[in-house]
Each structure stands twice: as C-alpha cells, then as structure tokens.
Image (cartoon, helix red, strand yellow):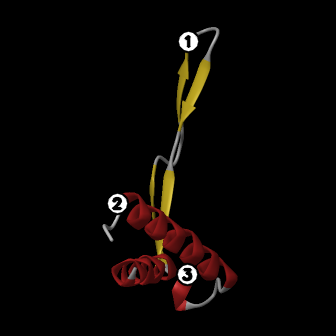
Amino acid sequence: MRKNAWTCFLLILAGIVIGGFIGSMFPTTWLNYGQSFGLTSPFVLDLGILCITFGMTINITIASIIGIAAAIVIYRFI
C-alpha cells in the first residue's frame, strides 16, 4: 500500500488540534507551556468598497508537539 502525503498532513493536523485541546484542559501544567507567534495586530486592506483583514497567530505548546510526534508514529504504522 502506497502512503499518501494527504494522510500524513491530516494526521499531523489532528495531532496539533488534539494536543492543543489537551494543553487547554490542563492550563497550569507543563503541557500548556509554549510560544505564540504571528501577526499580533491584523493587517487591514481597505479598498473603499471592500475591506480585507489579514491576521494569523500560531500557538505552539508542549502538548501540540507531543500530538505531532504521536501522529508521525501513527503514520509510520499505517
């Protein structure tokens, strides 16, 4: 069976989401320790009739890193 890149991407994305959820369940533990980076104030493009706002913040925690590692291990066994 040939492994698919989309399967790997979806597993890693699920690992990030589940890890972030677990980290938010335990906010005072070491699992929720991490770094946040990105655009803290959004970039606004006002064209008169159309206003577009760009912004993105990524919050990397220990729990999400563990989730990524678990997703990669699961992908290797598929």
Near mark 3 (Cα within 10 A), the count class, few <14, some 14-19 or many ≥20, is many
Near mark 2 (Cα within 10 A), the count class, few <14, some 14-19 or many ≥20, is few
Q: Nearer the viewer, residue 69 or 63?
A: 69
The answer to whether residue 38 is above or below residue 49 is: below
The answer to whether residue 2 is above or below residue 48 is: below
Q: Name the residue at the right extreme.
A: 25
Residue corresponding to mark 3: 32
Q: Percent from the top left, x then y, of residue 29?
A: 58, 91
Residue corresponding to mark 1: 47
Left or right: 39 in relation to 4: right
- Asked if labels 2 and 1 touch by Cβ distance under 8 angstroms, the answer is no
Which of the two discs, 1 and 2, sits closer to the camera? 2
Residue corresponding to mark 2: 5
Q: Which badge, 1 or 3, comes first in the chain's sequence?
A: 3
Left or right: 2 in relation to 16: left
How many numbered circles are shown?
3
Left or right: 31 in relation to 22: left
The three-letter code of the residue at mark 1 reads Leu
Residue at 35% from the left image edge and 62% from the top image edge? 4
